[in-house]
């Protein structure tokens, strides 16, 4: 990344950009796939715990369940949970695609030889 772009990024954006750059360097499949899944599952667990903790705080304040969406912290934690879940779904799609590719390749080799 150009230095000017890095200077303007917040720490969260910089971390996300670093993660994306890491994906392109190591590839989306292969040895690092298991580690990536573990990381995403850990992140989802942490995000869910944070969301549940905020829900308990809002319940203690007497905020109704339908009014939680007005709380900025609840929205942040809820968005983080959705984001990590979507990443896990994308990861599952990549794994399925890679397995399908390997299967087709094996069938092609079996038919040829």
Image (cartoon, grey):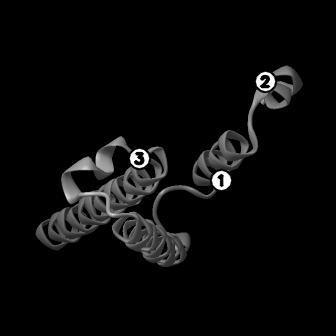
Q: Are marks 3 and 2 in contact (CB under 8 Å)?
A: no
55 displayed left or right of 24: left
Rounded to the nearest whole Å, what is the CA distance between mark 3 and mark 1? 34 Å
- Secondary element under disc 2, as helix, strand or loop, is helix
Residue nearest the viewer, comparing 87 with 46? 46
Q: Please provide percent x and percent y for residue 9.
A: 75, 32
Q: Report the residue marked by disc 1.
A: 22
Q: Report the residue marked by disc 3.
A: 71
- Secondary element under disc 1, as helix, strand or loop, is helix
Residue nearest the viewer, comparing 34 with 99? 34
Q: Splitting the image into 4 quarters, where does residue 60 fall? A: bottom left
What residue is shown at x 50% (from left), y 77% (from top)? 42
What residue is shown at x 48% (from left), y 69% (from top)? 50
Q: Earlier in the sequence, mark 3 or mark 1?
A: 1
74 displayed left or right of 16: left
What residue is shown at x 86% (from left), y 28% (from top)? 7
Q: Please provide percent x and percent y for residue 3.
A: 88, 26
Q: In the orientation shown, which residue stands out farthest toward the top?
A: 4
80 displayed left or right of 70: right
Residue nearest the viewer, comparing 100 with 8? 8
Q: In this figure, what is the number of numbered marks?
A: 3
Q: In the orientation shown, which residue stands out farthest toward the left?
A: 111
Q: Earlier in the sequence, mark 3 or mark 2?
A: 2
Q: Quadrant of the C terminus?
A: bottom left
Q: Please provide percent x and percent y for residue 59.
A: 34, 68
- Closer to viewer: mark 1 or mark 2: 2
Rounded to the nearest whole Å, what is the CA distance between mark 3 and mark 2? 31 Å
Rounded to the nearest whole Å, what is the CA distance between mark 1 and mark 2? 18 Å
- Closer to viewer: mark 3 or mark 2: 3
Q: Which mark is residue 5?
A: 2
């Amino acid at each position: 990344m150009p230095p000017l772009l890095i200077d303007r990024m917040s720490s969260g954006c910089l971390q996300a950009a670093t993660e994306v750059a890491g994906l392109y360097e190591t590839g989306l499949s292969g040895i690092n796939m298991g580690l990536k899944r573990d990381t995403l599952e850990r992140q989802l667990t942490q995000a869910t715990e944070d969301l549940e903790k905020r829900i308990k705080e809002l319940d203690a304040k007497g905020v109704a369940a339908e009014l939680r969406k007005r709380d900025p912290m609840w929205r942040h934690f809820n968005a983080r949970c959705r984001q990590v879940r979507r990443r896990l779904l994308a990861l599952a799609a990549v794994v399925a695609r890679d397995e399908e590719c390997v299967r087709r390749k094996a069938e092609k080799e079996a038919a040829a030889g």
